[in-house]
Image (tube, rainbow, N blue to C red):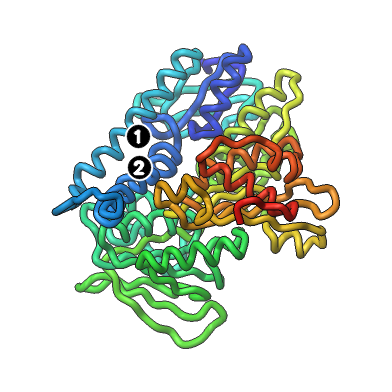
Amino acid sequence: MAESFDLIILGAGPGGYVAAIRAAQLGMNVACVDSRDTLGGVCLNVGCIPSKVLLESSHLFVHTRDDLAAHGITTKGVSVDLGKMLARKDKVVEDLTKGITFLFKKNKVTFVQGYASFTSTTSVSVKGKDGTRELSAPRIIIATGSAPTELPGVTIDEKTVVTSTGALSLAKVPEHLVIIGGGYIGLEMGSVWRRLGAKVTVIEYLDSLVPSMDKEVCLALTKSLKNQGMDFLLSTKVMRVDQTKKGLTVVTSPSQGGVESTLSCDVLLSCAGRRPYTQGLDLDKIGLSLDARGFIPVNHDFATSVPGIYAIGDVIGGAMLAHKAEEEGVACVEGMVGQKPHVNYGAIPAVIYTSPEVASVGKTQEQLAQEGVPFTVGKFPFSANSRARATSATEGFVKILAHAQTDEVLGVHIIHADAGTLIGEAALAMEYRASSEDIARTCHAHPTTSEAVKEAALSALGRAIHI
């Protein structure tokens, strides 16, 4: 006999586990199903969190080796213990997954380990390590996330040809790491292994890195990463990867066709995008169809075409970001109890955790120009910011795009060591439809890097003080 719940959530990633906790707070009896033994999904187990741990550790190594002398701090014989670095990464992940387990117990959310498949519109069968469990509920949320896109001619073994999962746990620093894809994941993982000593070459099909990024910021990031020793092959596609006795041979050609060329490496990271993950759910049994790209269509309440079935996160498309999935999960369950939640997709920030970081929210300059929206540009360099000078983090700038007639902030783009933190103010401003004058007239503590945001807002008004 099936175990009965008010709500079943398929997937315990950021969207799924947050939705489960919020639903429990709202009084629902919730079951959350995931194939892993630990909660948190790809993001916490093999994505966002472990990659940020390695980014921080590798950054501290380079900072100690190269930058401390300017502060009068002498260091000698600085080296990396890769085993300890990876062990710390695993410990951070373990502690955080245990934290979600605690939150599930605190909120009385039932975790069911296993692979779920629909048996009807109100029931699923879950095959786990301890056998099969039948669950039923009048509402079911699909939050199964995404998986790496598979490329023809590239066979993943997670040893020498790896996805981001394998790249988090390489046994040694590669001599030459080739990365397919110049997006967030490729640039972040490339940064980690470049800092630790690997030669890194990034192959990107398009003519620039992260095509959704503001072009001016993109050029600044590309220049910075090149200065750090990363190589880029733009407008280039990978035809195939051959295994040889000496390692790997990557066969490439120009994106629009042309003469093939090769390069050798010992490790290849394939991260040319991600695809929605719905395999094994037996969606056909409930009459739920996917769109042409494999995503689940939903309405503004995250309801699918099948009554009682909802979907959130990567499986419904849009920006594949953990915090976007979280917002959708909360909005989805709050709507179920009659509340009127809303996700403002125009104010969802995005961050690339390279060094410097890149963070953005809203429209790019190119998008506004293409849409014919009149705008003003305000910029302020961190080289003129006193706190940045004190910390030696002077690389980068803040760029604010405001409507030329109403002064409403339409987009903010930051490249700097603190960009991921600073973008929060911009997201809040856009959520409340603030003007650049609103930001400019807000008192910012001195000396802080946040003053650069204020100065960029002043610049948009034509009256920056410190430049």
Question: Which residue is more in the foreground, 266 or 31?
Answer: 266
Q: Dot 2 lies on which element?
A: helix
Image quarter in which the C terminus is found: bottom right
Residue shown at 34% from the left, 66% from the top: 200
Label 2 neighbourhood size at 10 Å, few (<14), some (14-19), many (20+)? Answer: many
Q: Position of residue 97 (x, y in %)?
A: 38, 29
Q: Are marks 1 and 2 in contact (CB under 8 Å)?
A: yes
Residue shown at 73% from the left, 49% from the top: 410
Residue shown at 67% from the left, 36% from the top: 442
Residue under pointer 1:
93
Considering only vertical position in the picture, is 114 above or below 191?
Answer: above
Q: For residue 278, say whether it is visible.
A: no
Q: Nearer the viewer, mark 1 or mark 2?
A: 2
Considering only vertical position in the picture, is 315 above or below 250?
Answer: above
Residue under pointer 2:
53
The amino acid type found where label 1 is placed reads Val
